[in-house]
Image (cartoon, helix red, strand yellow):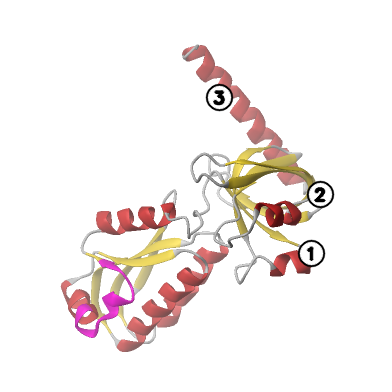
Amino acid sequence: MKIDKLIYEHFAELRLRGEFDTFYAPKLGEEVDKLIAEGTLFAVLNLRLVKFINSTALGAIIKAHKRFKAEGGEFVIGQPSPFTKSVITKLGIDKIVPMYSSLDEAHAALKSAMLNDATPDVIGESNVLFHFLDEDKATKMGTRKTGLGTVLSVDHQRIRFTWTGGHLNLSPTEIEELLAPGTVLHHKFILRLFKKGFFEVQGEVEQSELRDNEETGGKEIVVSARFLDIAESDRLALAQYADDLDYLKKQLEDVNPS
């Protein structure tokens, strides 16, 4: 069997081909772990080209679904082959792992799950994963230990982002205390317009301020964190990225003056 991984803007697709049996069951778990480690918390399992599936493989699918759910994400089955669809429905697996006849339906279900206030957004061009170096603060983040913020701006010196508290049901005061000035964070973010890999940089919160979130009607915190001990290659790359964005914005303004 072969597993192809396709990465979209907000979710991933694992496309299986061949016979999904006991030997390949651990392979699915490995791919799931990689996706979650990269910050991708929503995925669809494409079974269109799977000719055979056994009980061990079905168990691996259920484990993958539980793994994503535990991280605040979602994992669904899309476009199953006639054989896999028959097996999954007869055994009632579709009552545990959502299954959709087409990929479009599966994609729509994932997007709907992303909009659910109970789940965080998937990491994308405008997202940053962060975790606390302080153990007391880290324990307040639940089992995931990681927060998912929305990037406002980033350059070679600092990053600015917002955070609503995710699915943790934190009060505004608790959010303020977690991200008070002086707090050291480990940031992980991607700039797909610039390079394929992630930037991982430690930073210290310089400023943080609560404000109203118009979409949710609740509160969010705006954080500005200054980078610490950033690698020279990352510093130069982020400086170039900021310059590139300024140039592009200037060109767009010239073409479309207000």
Q: Which residue position is annotated with label 2?
A: 228
Give me the residue at 79% from left, 64% from top.
134
Q: Which residue position is annotated with label 3?
A: 248
Q: Which residues are magenta?
A: 89-99
Q: Amino acid at mark 3?
A: Leu
- Could you tell me residue 224's position as x and y percent? 73, 42
Q: Which mark is residue 134?
A: 1
Q: Amino acid at mark 2?
A: Leu
Give me the residue at 28% from left, 76% from top.
95
- For residue 139, above or below residue 25: above
Query: Based on the displayed image, in which of its 4 quarters is residue 237 positioned?
Result: top right
Mark 1 residue crowding within 10 angstroms, few (<14) / some (14–19) / many (20+): few
Quarter of the figure with the N terminus: bottom left
Query: Based on the displayed image, in which of its 4 quarters is residue 81 positioned?
Result: bottom left
- Could you tell me residue 153's position as x and y percent? 64, 37
Identify which residue, 91 or 232, lies in the foreground: 91
Instruction: Give the secondary structure at mark 3.
Output: helix
- For residue 90, above or below residue 116: below
> Which-is-in-front pick, marks 3 and 1?
1
